[in-house]
Each structure stands twice: as structure tokens, then as C-alpha cells.
Image (tube, grey):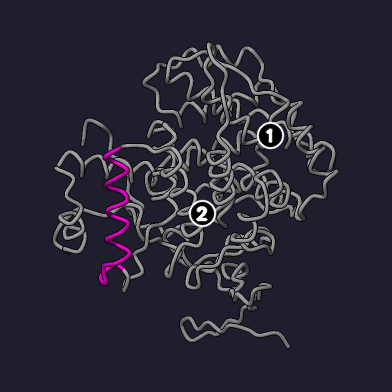
Amino acid sequence: MSEKATLGINGKTYEFPIVKGTEDELGIDISSLRNSTGGIITLDPGFKNTGSCESAITFLDGEKGILHYRGYSIEELAEKAEFLEVAYLLIFGELPNKEQLDKFHDDIKHQSVVDEDVKKILDAFPKSAHPMGVLSSLTSALTAFNPSSVDVRSEEAMYKSIVKILGKFPVLVSWTLRKKMGQPLNYGSTSLGYVENVLQMMFSQPNEEYVLNPIVVEALDKLLILHADHEQNCSTSTVRIAGSSHAGLFVSLASGISALWGPLHGGANQAVIEMLEAIQKDGGDTKKYMAKAKDKEDPFRLMGFGHRVYKNFDPRAKIIKKAADAILNDLGIEDPILDIAKGLEKEALEDSYFVDRKLYPNVDFYSGVIYRALGIPTDMFTVMFALGRLPGWIAQWREMRLNKEPIGRPRQIYIGKTLRPFIPVEER
């Protein structure tokens, strides 16, 4: 007999099945709660204790600092795999063999040209427009150039739609940057790898040959892998709930980009650099700001340290720290902002206040440092996050549609006025 959870309400007892995941996670299935109790629901602001779906994509244990994609540890994937391999794994469930990977890459390359009319949409944006707003709009606009909906019952149609967005999205990312910088728009080269193409499209200049730095390529590849998926976070849940209405893939992704934009989500690495810049303007005294961070009465908050999910350490941060160190050493950058970052990192790793509370630098801290070192503007950081998260969003959308999940429709507890009569305007 399967385990049950018992709920007592007003002298009545109700039983609900307990669901067990493959990693021994337990959840109470309350899908029948409202019907069986005559209208009672649960109240869980922010859905912090609510499982919205069953998913086979990503496993995350914040207490133990564990992150797995499809059963593979993030540490092993970051060390041994390339971003496109991880994208294939997330979306289709298994690592590709050489033939599958080559075909996947070739098919993406063949879809990496964007309709010229998209440039007209981009031209309408001022240079001052936030890159995330531009990217969300351009991604949504792709729907106009690809109006037919995806037949989710057809593996071929699903595959074509997936390689299409994987091919065109890096172009939109690079165009978003180049628009901001006032540079001519360009395309990648079919002779380059996926990550190499991203760098070439973003940074090449029309009057000189662009030379790829293998350390930079490796660092960006790792960053994209580390950002590729992260279970049911705000943007991923947004993609799934938008898609649950049977909205198309591109527009569902655009909704995820908008959700990622917020400073409490994808904008966290931007907030890190803004904090470092504020510290520099105030004289660059890291010890002063570490003391402010420890003072509960001080409104200052140390950005990029600790994590709302990882209560021990962020496994992604351990991986990307090495890449950050390699880039700073290789490029030999002299930047007072990055010097402040290194100072904060050193003090936090040695200060018992932060060590005891497990307030270690997280992936947002190191990714912000890397993007700054690469010369990427601060307000483009979240765009780079979106580029990495793209395969995860696709995988989650695909899983949701294939599982035929019902349309998302949260309930509420109404706390407004009770029924009252209408008063004519002259009597109010």
C-alpha cells in the first residue's frame, strides 16, 4: 500500500497520496484537494513549497549543493562536455553520439540566418533601450516570420523548430549588443563552433580579423553550460505556464526572457558589477563594505554571495571560479572594479562570519567578473544568461507539451470587499 498524507479540517479527515521522485524527493499530491474538500485550497505565496510539475530534466539539492542535468553531475559536464552536447542532452534526454552531434550542429548552422526585415524592427529601438527588452521583442517577433505552430506530435516538426531557434538566437544576441555599441550587424561563420561563433559575431570588427582566444572560448562555454537549466525557477516556470496555453515555442521563450530580466533573477550578475562600481566610487575600501554587510542595521547588501536555493555552496561557482581566474591572469586586465571583486572574494572566503553562514561567492559573482573582463556591457549580462538558459527553456517547454500538462491556472484567497450595492455617480 502506498503512503498517504492525512489532512484534518473542521473535524473531517482527508487523505492524499505521497509522490516519490527518483532521487527520493517526497511530495504530497494535492491535485484533488479542492474537489474533495468542497473548495479548500492551499496558500503558498511564491510557490516555494509547491511542485508545479513532474520533470525528468534537472535535479537540484540546495542543502547538499548538488546540480544534475538528466542524471549527469554539473561538475562532470562542465569538465568534459561542450555546450551543444549539454543542450542536446537537456532537450532530448541523452548525450548525442558523434553523428547526432554533428548533424545537430550542422542543422543549427543552416538555420542561423535571420529574415532581413528583423533588422527593421531592431532599427526602431534607440541605442538606450535595455538589451533584454530588445532581445525579448526580437524573439517574439520571430513568430511573425515563422507563423505556423509547432506540431508537438511530430518529432520532425519539433526538431526543426528547436534547431531554428538555436540557430537564430545567438544572432539576435549579437545584434542586440552591436546595436547598443553602434556597430554593423553581422553573421557567424559555418566554419566555427557554436560558442566560437557567438564570440565572433559579438566582437569582430569590419576592418580587422577576429582572433579567438581559446581561454575565453572555454570560459564562455562553461558559463553557458552552468546556466543551461536550473529546475523550476521564475523564468522556467514562466516558459512552462505560457506554453501550457499552447502558446508557440518562440513566444513562450520571449516570456521567459522577460521574467529573467528582473534583478532578483537573471539580473543578479548585473547587480554585482553595479555594487562593485558603487564601492569604487566610495573609495574602494572592501573592509568597510564587508563590515557594512555584517551590520544588520545597515541597508547595504552584498550582491553575488550566498544563494536562495543553495544553502551550502553553489556548485556552479566552484567551477566558474577557475575560469574567472584563468581569464584575469591570461588577459592581464588592469581594472579597479575587478580588483575590488578579488578583494571581496578573498575576505569573504577567510572571514568566519561569511564562512559560518556559508555566504560564498555564487555563480552570479563570477559570471559578472568574467563578462566585465571580456568587455561586455553590464546591461548585456542578463542577455548572456538568456543565451545559456535557452536549451533549458526549450527542454522544459518540450517536456510540458509532450506530457500534455493542463493549462496553468493558480488559485487565490480573495481578501477584497464583499458584495456591495452600486452607487450612482451623483450620490458618491
Kindly indicate the quadrant of the structure image that contains residue 273: top left
State the residue position of label 1.
193
Secondary structure of residue under mark 2: loop
Above or below for 188 versus 154: above
x and y percentages locating residue 335 in the rendered image: 30, 37
Q: How many marks?
A: 2
Give the magenta-colored segment's residue range: 335-354
Residue shown at the point (55%, 70%) measured from the top left: 38
**Residue at 57% over, 48% down:** 222
**Three-letter code, disc 2:** Asn
Q: Is residue 114 left or right of residue 179?
A: right
Residue drawn at (50%, 84%), measured in percent from left and top?
8
Q: Residue beneath label 2, please?
A: 233
- Quadrant occupied by the N terminus: bottom right
Please name the residue shown 40% across and 61% down the image.
308
Judge the density around disc 2: few (<14), some (14-19), many (≥20) Cα neighbours within 10 Å. Answer: few
